[in-house]
Amino acid sequence: MDAAAVRFLNAGAGAFPPFDRLMEAFASDYLVPVAGSLALLGLWLAGSHAERPLNQIATISAAAAIGVANAVTSIFNTMVDRPRPFTEIETLTLLFYKPTDPSFPSNSAAVGFALATAVFLRRRRLGAGLYALAFLWAFARVYGGVHYPTDVLAGAAIGVACGLAVWGAFRLLAFAPRFVLRALRRVYAA
Amino acid sequence: MLWVFLSALGAAQFAAVHGGLWGIVILRRRPRAARVSALLLVAASFVWFFASGDRNQPDIGEGLNGVEQARWFAVSAAASVVFQLAVSSVVNHRWGAAHGWDPAVDRWPPSGLAWMERATFARALAALALAAARRAR
């Protein structure tokens, strides 16, 4: 069923080159990570007196969530050595280079959704935008033939779980980000 | 690297206008132009980066792996922020003079980015250095 789903989604690849170029950009290792990082840079500076510290805590928690999601995905990658779809389905139109690491779970989906969840819990509109980017990143990877849908679903679940876990940890250990912010404020960095 | 430098410049300037951190806004006298040019800079740098070559390079070949990406992003974004702080401190030099801190009255200058609503970064650092030197004496 997973193979049928990736075949179905990949069927449009190659039919309309401008859409393929767009999907290639979204699937790349650069567009969403850089856009997400720029959103965090903006979040750090934006907002009123009262909002800015909350925005900065959201930024720190998003960075932490990305790190945790990356680590969790790496652990899963060592346990589940699932081949990439393009190695099993010869008819796929590949819009991406051939990654050599395991397919399950998708690291990009995990990172994208961890970032979006951590931001969404404090800043709804920006978080919703980041969810849209994470979704497009994950979709483009399936459309491009480098992931099965279950890879990105598992990655998204890991990302959301890591975002929630970091949010919970930051609520329990609220002094830690506040300590960091206090130190940064002394040199006008926060 | 240039892509991140330029897009970070745009993102930070847009956010600084949004947050009212006028001391670090390069086009402080024209907030609307600052917002529009910041957004255009971000959009143009993204379009330029993806239109100027094939960006789907293997991350263990010509492309960058995750760690390298994070490192280059941090270096480029930091360079961009330093550039903005330096340029905004120069162009807002006169405006930043009325920053609301009187060394004769207050021992320490205000802390945090919030002071960039009234002072430039260079003035804030100078005030901090002055207060620290005075305390050391």
Image: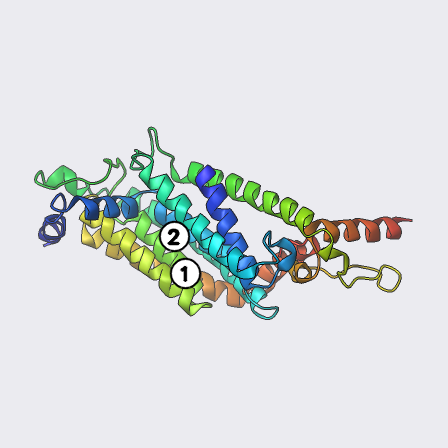
Residue at 91%, 49% (x, y): give it. Answer: B137
Could you say whether the residue bearing mark 2 is in a helix, strand or loop? helix
Q: Nearer the viewer, residue B98 or A120?
A: B98
Q: Which mark is first along the chain, 2 or 1?
A: 2
Q: Is residue A178 left or right of residue A71?
A: right
What's the image's color scheme? rainbow
Q: Chain of mark 1?
A: A
Q: CA distance from mark 1 to mark 2?
A: 8 Å
Q: Amino acid at mark 1?
A: Gly
Give coordinates of residue B69: x percent, y percent. Answer: 42, 39
Evaluate whether residue A142 shows in this view: yes
Q: Nearer the viewer, residue A55 or A19?
A: A19
Q: Is residue A91 left or right of residue A26?
A: left
Q: Amino acid at mark 2?
A: Ala
Outermost residue toward the bottom?
A50
> Which image quarter: residue A157?
bottom left
Give coordinates of residue A87: x percent, y percent. Answer: 15, 37
Q: Which mark is residue A155?
A: none
Q: Nearer the viewer, residue A93 or A101?
A: A93
Against A86, is B35 above or below? below
Q: Is residue B127 left or right of residue B24?
A: right
Residue at 48%, 53% (x, y): give it. Answer: B37
Give coordinates of residue B18: x percent, y percent. Answer: 54, 63
Q: Which mark is residue A163?
A: 1
